């Protein structure tokens, strides 16, 4: 991993990370998604006793498929867009082995020639970040409803009502927090659950589609390929 650090150049973009740095979990990955460094907090959260146990491993190897899929997709977006991602709300395993909500910020890392080499990020326990996450707290009841009912017909009006907000207020606060619309969030949630069913069960593609809220298999296949770059069948074949 010394070659990686010899090439990486940390420029002014590091300020974005420092401005959002909570001092909890810190991680660095190369373009292949392999960990090149983590701090002590992250090491314990990942269930490792020493840094060497993590170096060179990917999210799938450290977290398993269910948690890793979202991380990999987010990293791919960062590598493609070459832009920082701030205040991402996601699930991460904590030092006690439990999964908890965290706030993640990531920045791309470039070498001296301006080529992207990887990324650096931090994950902050959600409870410690409440001060900076008031928009999320305002929409939390609606988000919880979405998480528990993603497979049902989606109504942003229902989510807004549960949060005691107008539809416009809910959508504005939601986009500020998640950097996407409620509709896109529901779609991504459905696809993430579909990934887990494809990898962990023997259900057919049509059954998986129904399970996660799609009543038209062709729509499910199209949306799945849009997000994952593979059809559901190809995805299952590749990762199982």
Image (cartoon, rainbow, N blue to C red):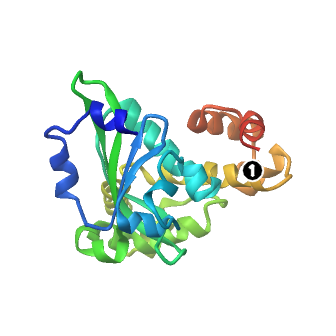
Quadrant position of the C terminus in the picture = top right
In the depicted structure, whether residue 50 falls above or below residue 217: below
Viewer-side residue, 43 vs 16: 43
Q: Within 10 angstroms of label 1, few (less than 14), some, or many (20 or more) residues?
A: some
Q: Residue at x 74, y 33 (%)?
A: 234
- Viewer can see residue 225: yes
Q: Position of residue 149 (x, y in %)?
A: 62, 66
Q: Residue at x 35, y 38 (%)?
A: 2
Q: Position of residue 12 (x, y in %)?
A: 13, 40
Viewer-side residue, 218 vs 195: 195
In the depicted structure, whether residue 125 falls above or below residue 233: below
Q: Residue at x 60, y 52 (%)?
A: 61
In the depicted structure, whether residue 90 falls above or below residue 205: below
In the depicted structure, whether residue 157 falls above or below residue 56: below
Per the image, label 1 sits on a secondary structure element best described as helix
User: In this image, 213 relative to 11: left or right?
Assistant: right
Residue 141 sits in quarter: bottom left
Q: Position of residue 1 (x, y in %)?
A: 40, 39
User: In this image, 108 relative to 112: left or right?
Assistant: right
User: In this image, 186 relative to 116: left or right?
Assistant: right
Residue 101 sits in quarter: bottom left
Q: Position of residue 104 (x, y in %)?
A: 36, 58
- Please give the residue where the numbered disc 1 appears in the rendered image: 199
- Viewer can see residue 165: no
Viewer-side residue, 1 vs 147: 1
Viewer-side residue, 106 vs 35: 35
User: In this image, 123 relative to 151: left or right?
Assistant: left
How many labels, in total?
A: 1
């Amino acid at each position: 991993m010394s070659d990686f650090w010899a090439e990486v150049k940390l420029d002014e973009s590091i300020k974005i990370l420092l401005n959002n740095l909570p001092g909890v979990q810190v991680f660095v990955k190369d373009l292949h998604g392999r960990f090149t460094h983590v701090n002590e907090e992250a090491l314990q959260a990942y269930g490792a006793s020493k840094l060497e146990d993590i170096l060179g491993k990917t999210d799938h190897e450290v977290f398993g498929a269910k948690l890793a899929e979202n991380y990999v997709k987010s990293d791919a977006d960062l590598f493609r867009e070459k832009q920082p991602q701030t205040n991402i709300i996601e699930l991460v395993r904590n030092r006690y082995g439990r999964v908890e909500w965290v706030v993640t910020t990531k920045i791309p890392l470039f070498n001296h020639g301006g080529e992207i080499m990887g990324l650096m990020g931090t994950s902050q326990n959600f409870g410690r970040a409440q001060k900076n996450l008031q928009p999320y707290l305002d929409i939390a009841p609606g988000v919880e409803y979405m998480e528990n009912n993603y497979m049902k017909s989606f109504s942003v009006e229902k989510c807004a009502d549960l949060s005691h907000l107008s539809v416009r207020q809910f959508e504005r606060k939601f986009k500020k927090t998640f950097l996407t619309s409620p509709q896109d969030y529901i779609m991504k949630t459905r696809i993430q659950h579909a990934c887990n069913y494809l990898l962990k069960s023997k259900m057919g593609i049509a059954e998986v589609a129904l399970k996660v809220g799609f009543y038209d298999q062709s729509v499910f296949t199209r949306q799945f390929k849009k997000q994952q770059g593979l059809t559901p069948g190809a995805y299952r074949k590749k990762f199982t």
